[in-house]
Image: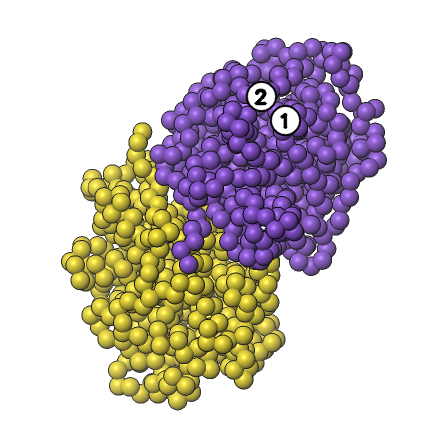
Chain colours: A yellow, B purple
Amino acid sequence: MQKQTKFLLSENDIPRYYYNIMADSPVPATPVLNPMTKEPVTPDFLSALFPMNLIEQEISMDRYIEIPDEVREIYKLWRPTPLIRAHRLEKALDTPAHIYFKYEGVSPSGSHKSNTAVAQAYYNKIAGTKALTTETGAGQWGSALSMACKFFDLDLEVYMVRVSYEQKPYRRYLMETYGAQVYPSPSTRTQAGKAILAQDADSPGSLGIAISEAVEAAAISNGLKKYGLGSVLNHVLLHQSVIGEEAIKQMDMADEYPDVVIGCVGGGSNFAGIAFPFLREKLLNDRDTRFIAVEPTASPTLTRGKYAFDYGDTAQMAPIVKMHTLGHDFIPAKIHAGGLRYHGMAPQMSMMVDAGLVNAVAISQMDVFEAASLFATTEGILPAPESAHAIRGAINEAMDAKALGEKRVILFNLSGHGHFDLTSYQAYNEGKLEHYDYPEEAIASIDERLPNVSLGVTN
Amino acid sequence: MQKQTKFLLSENDIPRYYYNIMADSPVPATPVLNPMTKEPVTPDFLSALFPMNLIEQEISMDRYIEIPDEVREIYKLWRPTPLIRAHRLEKALDTPAHIYFKYEGVSPSGSHKSNTAVAQAYYNKIAGTKALTTETGAGQWGSALSMACKFFDLDLEVYMVRVSYEQKPYRRYLMETYGAQVYPSPSTRTQAGKAILAQDADSPGSLGIAISEAVEAAAISNGLKKYGLGSVLNHVLLHQSVIGEEAIKQMDMADEYPDVVIGCVGGGSNFAGIAFPFLREKLLNDRDTRFIAVEPTASPTLTRGKYAFDYGDTAQMAPIVKMHTLGHDFIPAKIHAGGLRYHGMAPQMSMMVDAGLVNAVAISQMDVFEAASLFATTEGILPAPESAHAIRGAINEAMDAKALGEKRVILFNLSGHGHFDLTSYQAYNEGKLEHYDYPEEAIASIDERLPNVSLGVTN
């Protein structure tokens, strides 16, 4: 009866430093290229989009970067987040595995995205920025940045992928309640959006397109607006390290250490957030942990993409980075995990996968919602469809442990709740959810859709 | 910089006993009458609706009732809930008041309702019940009972007030994800529902009507189904005492004691949950605290209703109790705080108001959403429209303290989040929210709409 369920830390345990995996990476950083010249970018190019303090973080090789007091003060509204032992899920699976999850859905905007949103808004504010632009898929990032911008008195314009704008109206209402301006993407507000609409007036949009629009809106603002990205970049990944740093302390409270750490991946930031601090322990302290990144079969960047230089966005305005990619013009199927509909991947994530330190698996939408439903009816929490990919990964590991009759300590990141995704659940409940397999045609044509870069490295 | 924001307890601090205000009430319990005979009810009559273990709690005079281990085990999924100091709201109001809120929205179903839902499902389960029926307004109670019934393997049928069924579809999807059957009320499934529809085919419904339908569905089931109520009854109120018991410990952690405790009231359970343990401290230990119950002007039961014997439901099938009432056939305006659209009040709440121990105020919908919006943009959390009544009450107290230049310690219950109420926020954001004043005509006619009871006491 006295089995512990929640492992809670106090406010004093909110991490004081962000962890930067680049200090410990066994492989060096790959260059970031200017999309026009295809030469390594200059800080000058980046400064049209980002304030210098974030650019410095982006290229930093420091292991630890101090978290400003003003940011930690706001983190107190929801951090430290709980680590929860999924006793009831374990029982339903009848598995000897111990399943833990870190729950980031307690943030006001409902996901891990608030961790970097508050940091980005703060760094922009002290750099003198007055307004930001951004994209959002399912709306987790847009909601998080909307709240953060409101807190720091910054204006915000959000380009929301049209399919999510239509599937998830509550997310838009939330962003508007926080004071943001929200536009469905592709829109007619930008050249990038107009070009896509000219080709396909019914375009469902993609993160790649929405990024193009948000980047363009900032780039043509004569410095009035900067751009904020919710994943992919290293400064975003390192802001998310608070998740893993807390989880290390909490696993210690539970007197266990994870055999496997699991997260879903779209751009890679929530995965990196929970995994990289544990990866540091593996690299520096020989802790034996496996890492599994779970992505959708409909957007199988890590499992079926190519590790190559490609544009970060569809309209070729964002920098070219080396990453696993399905091609910058890839438009994923309309899966309900809108946050995972991205053609590329964080370069640091791709490096770790390429180095064999992180494994990737792809899971289809139906299997994901089956796991989401089982989780909701055992643990109570309704997970975001994105996060449910991690749940499915954890269940698969737990069932494997059961088949082998072994105890296994599984930790996954429940990056957000699904309160704004209930139309997706209803489609599942009514048997109307579509099955999406691998996009074989797009996968076969990746090579011919990649840009030519002349570094003599790849492509 | 080191000001504390969250006050967290450990799992061991989850209360071990429910607190029953009837042990300490300065006024005696009023009788509960059979709606047919208008004589005091027998346990036999009640046992058609409730299992005997809950009937015993309903009439108990014990001060403390032990919480079963099985219930505490499930409480661990979200309890103890945080107590949060609203530093950012205080700053926005520029008030010397200290504002604290107890946040019940962290439960999986998003509100305090889970506290009694789990208890009711458990007590029904051990009594041999196989299925439950219930009503729900905005859906907080229906969601909570859906999850609890799933956990204890009980079937559930929910009659959801039609206006909320239409305004808040996500709540229905959530209940269905937890496995419940949900019907808009008035429905054609019951005689009570058909009778209302015959009078008004477009009836928006009310909690009173939905209760009639759920009671009828249980009453005609030949004992196959029992009925669960989300508020009003004393066993529900005492299940909610975990809120206040935790808050007492947490205020102690903050080294403060509330000058005023505030909650919203529909049936009265979340208010009683936070207030009655503090009221015990006032009655037994002379702690000097004021209590303020906040209700909507559109359904002003405590402020403009009559303290009299009346039916708990519209179709006169539920017991007659002495309470503040607007008349059992009162249909409130379509305010977005669906959970507060009830004609009556918990008898224990009414007793305390009548005895002068609790004060009541009524606030209009527009003022409530203004407060909700300010809260969301300062504290981040999007409150339920119901809970936002308590926020408005707290803001009014804080502004009063400011006007008087005095420090005042304010504690309110944030009974739930508003993630499923975003269409209401959108109506507010777009300037489309209706203003609802007091229903003067209904108030003027209460006397003639009350039942005749022959106790020689009132009516």
Q: Which residue is mark 1?
A: B352
Query: For the residue carrying disc 1, how many other residues have a C-alpha within 10 Å: few (<14), some (14-19), or many (20+)?
Result: many
How far apart marks 1 and 2 lie (CA) works out to: 8 Å
Q: Does the rendering let one see residue A151?
A: yes
Query: For the residue carrying disc 2, how many other residues have a C-alpha within 10 Å: few (<14), some (14-19), or many (20+)?
Result: some
Q: Residue at x 72, y 37 (%)?
A: B299
A283, above or below A420, in the image: below
Q: Given the image, on which type of amino acid does mark 2 rest? A: Ser
Q: Secondary structure at mark 1?
A: helix
Out of A204 and B306, give the one closest to the viewer: B306
Q: Quadrant of residue A361?
A: bottom left
Q: Position of residue A276 (x, y in %)?
A: 28, 61
Q: Residue furthest left?
A: A286
Q: Which quadrant, please, contains the C terminus of chain A? A: bottom left
Q: Which mark is residue A355?
A: none
Q: Given the image, on which type of amino acid does mark 1 rest? A: Met
Q: Position of residue B107 (x, y in %)?
A: 47, 41
Out of B67 and B47, give the one closest to the viewer: B67
Q: Position of residue B154 (x, y in %)?
A: 48, 28
Q: Does the rendering let one see residue A142?
A: no
Q: Which residue is mark 2?
A: B25
Mark positioned earlier in the residue sequence (1 or 2):
2
Q: Residue at x 65, y 17 (%)?
A: B30
